[in-house]
Image (tube, helix red, strand yellow):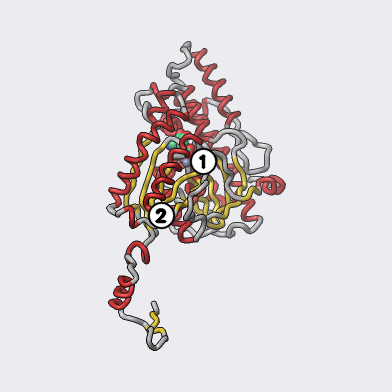
């Protein structure tokens, strides 16, 4: 650091003591305002009320989360007004818990970052109106966050990953493949044409009444399917992965859901049981649906890697594939993707499972990334709105389809 000598008007290299004296005279708090950025992140886009304080080195100073999973499992799916009410009841406490755990004073925050898109309108609204009040009260900058951008960038908190990298985001509400070229610079290669894989797994788990299974009663649908699949034999059913002929990177899961639905109805007849009772073949069905979904996801991702390499969008060697979102916590699906990355000479990176599902840390970290890049930092929140639907990046999926890349077959021995 150089300082200006006011009398001689030339720069000199001062001692550490002089630097601190100067900072104090400018009323700088060296930790917060000069050396360390601190962001409070708030997430309410779906069914988790979450908050965290993260610093610019990626240290999580405090975090808190309230999950609504058990409530929604009982009602057989997310009822938006119920989710909204639960967010309202918990947001103040969760933010307070995250701040208290961080042991910083709110005045030390550099900014507040909150998910404002995409998600359930009623849920997003709670987080946004709480945050708008908080930023006005604390007089802090506000950073609106795209939920999927946050999932994509989480890996840069846990690992040293440079741009560009390929990201596969698979969750309850989303399914997409994108090239991440910068903090807010995405090329969308493909997405689900109907439902997301987590939604499909949740529906199958519900149809199988897995909440009645003694081991799975508190697990999300996807987690219950993964758990049960370990005890099942997928080979009892022969199900073809969806979209075999479409040479693009789009996904589809609703056809698979209907196939499984028909299989369950057939099995109920064979086993002579009523809808809503546990099937003895539930584990085999779970194994088959998990395997088919894993193969479908792996094939689309394989094509995305080949496309990016063909167009020189990713390095030819050691390109990185990041997988995140709730479904990325599934180890069977991770293994299927590992087969693809091994075959293409790429590195597979996934955040730890607790950072794959929704959390406040990823929102706070996205805030840090945007703060460092100087992108989307608002000093006035007048007129800010949430957006239930919002695409991620520039959509080049048509170009991907036109390239019609043939994917060499891989043995999916998982
Ligand atoms: O990212 P997330 O927490 O929320 C959304 O943004 O959707 O993802 C939740 C989804 C749910 O559909 C849940 O069933 C699924 O992730 N999920 C899993 C697993 N754990 C959670 N799916 C498959 N295997 C898992 N272990
Ligand atoms: Zn999510």
Quadrant of res 292: top right
Relative to 53, is 145 on the left or the right? Answer: right
Relative to 8, is 317 on the left or the right? Answer: right
| Percent x, y of residue 215 | 35, 27
| Percent x, y of residue 192 | 59, 38
Q: Which mark is residue 140?
A: 2
In the figure, 325 relative to 217: above or below? below
- Which circle, 2 or 1, is nearer the viewer? 2
Quadrant of res 22: bottom left
- Mark 1 near ligand 1 (CB under 8 Å)? yes
Disc 1: which residue: 170
Q: Is residue 141 visible?
A: yes
At 49% from the left and 46% from the top, the residue drawn is: 323
Relative to 157, is 345 on the left or the right? Answer: right
Task: Classify mark 1: residues with Cα within 10 Å, few (<14), some (14-19) or many (20+).
Answer: many
Q: Earlier in the sequence, mark 2 or mark 1?
A: 2
Q: Nearer the viewer, residue 388 or 7?
A: 7
Relative to 313, is 3 on the left or the right? Answer: left
Q: Farthest top residue?
A: 272
Task: Classify mark 2: residues with Cα within 10 Å, few (<14), some (14-19) or many (20+).
Answer: some
Q: Helix, strand, or loop for circle 2?
A: loop
| Percent x, y of residue 348 | 49, 50
In the figure, 76 relative to 139: above or below? above
At 58% from the left and 30% from the top, the residue drawn is: 254
At 30% from the left and 73% from the top, the residue drawn is: 20
At 52% from the left and 13% from the top, the residue drawn is: 269
């Amino acid at each position: 650091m150089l300082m200006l000598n006011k009398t001689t008007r030339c720069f000199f290299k001062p001692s550490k003591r002089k630097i601190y004296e100067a900072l104090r005279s400018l009323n700088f708090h060296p930790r917060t305002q000069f050396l360390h950025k601190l962001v409070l992140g708030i997430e309410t886009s779906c069914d988790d009320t979450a908050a965290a304080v993260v610093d610019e080195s990626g240290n999580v100073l405090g975090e808190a989360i309230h999950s609504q999973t058990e409530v929604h499992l009982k009602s057989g799916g997310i009822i938006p007004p119920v989710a909204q009410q639960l967010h309202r009841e918990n947001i103040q406490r969760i933010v307070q818990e995250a701040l208290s755990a961080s042991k910083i004073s709110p005045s030390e925050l550099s900014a507040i970052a909150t998910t404002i898109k995409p998600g359930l309108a009623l849920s997003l609204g709670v987080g946004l109106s709480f945050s708008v009040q908080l930023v006005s009260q604390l007089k802090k900058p506000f950073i609106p966050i795209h939920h999927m951008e946050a999932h994509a960038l989480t890996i840069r908190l846990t690992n040293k990953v440079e741009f560009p990298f390929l990201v596969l985001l698979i969750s309850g509400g989303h399914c997409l493949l994108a090239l991440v070229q910068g903090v807010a610079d995405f090329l969308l290669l493909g997405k689900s044409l109907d439902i997301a894989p987590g939604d499909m797994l949740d529906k199958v788990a519900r149809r199988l009444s897995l909440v009645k299974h003694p081991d799975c009663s508190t697990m999300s649908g996807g987690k219950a399917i993964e758990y049960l699949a370990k005890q099942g034999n997928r080979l009892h059913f022969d199900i073809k992965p969806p979209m075999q002929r479409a040479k693009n990177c789009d996904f589809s899961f609703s056809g698979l859901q209907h196939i499984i639905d028909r299989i369950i109805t057939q099995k109920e007849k064979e086993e002579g049981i009523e809808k809503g009772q546990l099937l003895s073949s539930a584990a085999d069905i779970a194994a088959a649906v998990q395997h088919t979904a894993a193969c479908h996801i792996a094939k689309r991702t394989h094509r995305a890697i080949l496309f990016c390499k063909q167009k020189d969008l990713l390095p030819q060697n050691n390109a990185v594939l990041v997988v995140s979102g709730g479904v990325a916590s599934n180890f069977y699906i991770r293994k299927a993707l590992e087969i693809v990355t091994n075959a293409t000479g790429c590195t597979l990176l996934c955040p730890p499972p607790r950072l794959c599902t929704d959390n406040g840390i990823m929102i706070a970290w996205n805030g840090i990334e945007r703060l460092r890049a100087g992108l989307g930092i608002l000093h006035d929140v007048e007129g800010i709105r949430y957006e239930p639907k919002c695409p991620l990046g520039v959509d080049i999926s048509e170009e991907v389809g036109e390239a019609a890349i043939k994917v060499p077959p891989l043995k999916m021995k998982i």
